[in-house]
Image (tube, grey):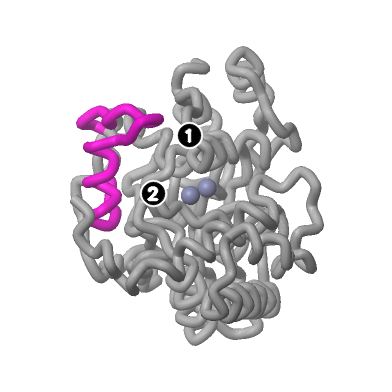
Amino acid sequence: MPNQIPRPKSRMVPGLLLAAVPLALGVSSPGLAQEADQFAKVEIKAEPLAEGVAVLFGAGGNIGVSYGPDGTILIDDQFAPLTEKIRTAVQNLGAGPVDYLINTHWHHDHTGGNENLGKSDVLIMAHDHVRDRLITGNDNVPPAAPEALPVVTYHDGIKLHLNGDEVRVQHMKHAHTDGDSIVFWKKANVVHMGDLFFNKVTLPFIDLSSGGNARGVLAAAEKVLAMVDDDTRIIPGHGPIATKADLQAYRDMMNTVIAAVAKAQGEGKSLQQVQAMKPAAQWDINPDAFIKGDAFVEAVYKSLQRPVHAEDHPH
Ligand SMILES: [Zn+2]
Ligand SMILES: [Zn+2]
């Protein structure tokens, strides 16, 4: 079903929609026909992280799974054509059918399976702005079907007490988007960061058109670092499982680039001048990355031109 992935129109948005497939398959610019083919080829691979907690890798955002006597919770659900494969992978873990779903944010590579799951009576939960943005859509994403919408929404967060663990879902303001949540399993010591953290696969994508801001990405990394220890398994939105040290390196990178861009901006340098300084060059090492140095620097530059939390209520 290639039409599940809208055709990109603007410069910033195509990446966000199409990123997942290229990221997962190592292809830089698939055509629509190829995309259908790519979903057919996608394998969903599970990696156990703790008792009753696993991650699923496929195409799109990494999926967290929590399962046990109280039910099965999914964190994100990739693309609609993958739902059946995801269900099979969940079953192969020894888990029951999915009961609950949490969306880390509204992007299509994390919510594409919502409609399928919603139709199977899965209870969908997410930040208020995820529901708002799914209802509205944008130039590239049509409004979501009613079944795809989160039924339980929250502003600051929510806690689930399931399968002998406390699962803390916490909103992080204006970061990758304006509706990001992290999910932390206290006992299992696992955290899912959604696209607040891209581990090793690309420079950060900051979706300014969805209320994102580079400063929020840095703040989120700081907040999560304060919650975790050296044994925590960190699920990034994209890329392999990470450690606290990986997240520290990411935080340091954000800090360095933001400081360099802020300084140059303070000296009156234009975006082009700041891009020419290549403040992210040291981390811009993957030629196939979805976000390269110039795009990242542009997002940081524009983030810093916005007042902090200027878009708290963008709708
Ligand atoms: Zn993503
Ligand atoms: Zn995203």
Q: In this view, does 302 lie to the left or right of 50?
A: left
Residue 107, label in figure: none
Q: Determine crowd level at label 2: few under 14, some 14-19, many 20+ residues with C-alpha closer than 10 A.
A: few
Kind of residue indicated by mark 2:
Ser
Q: What residue type is labelled 1?
A: Ser
Answer with the quarter of the image where residue 273 lies.
bottom right
Instruction: Check mark 2 vs ligand 2: CB closer than 8 Å? yes or no.
Output: no
Range of magenta residues: 124-147
Taking 83 as reference, is 51 left or right?
Answer: right
Q: Nearer the viewer, residue 72 or 103?
A: 103
Q: Nearer the viewer, residue 93 or 189?
A: 189
Q: Residues within 10 Å of mark 1 (few under 14, many from 20)?
A: few
Residue behind label 1 places its C-beta within 8 angstroms of ligand 2 = no
Instruction: Give the labeled residue for mark 2.
Output: 209
Q: Which mark is residue 10?
A: 1
Residue at 60% over, 76% down: 264
Q: Distance between the residues labelled 1 and 2?
A: 11 Å
Q: Where does residue 73 sit, x and y in percent of width and height?
A: 39, 52
- Determine the secondary structure under disc 2: helix
Image coords of residue 257 (percent x, y)? 63, 73
Residue occupying image coordinates x 55% and y 30%: 85
With respect to residue 117, does 168 lie above or below?
A: below
Query: Quick check: can you spot residue 90?
Result: no
Seen at 61% across and 70% down, the residue is 233
Residue 37 visible in this rendered orientation of the protein: yes
Between 93 and 155, the one lying in front of the other is 155
Q: Is residue 2 above or below residue 46?
A: above
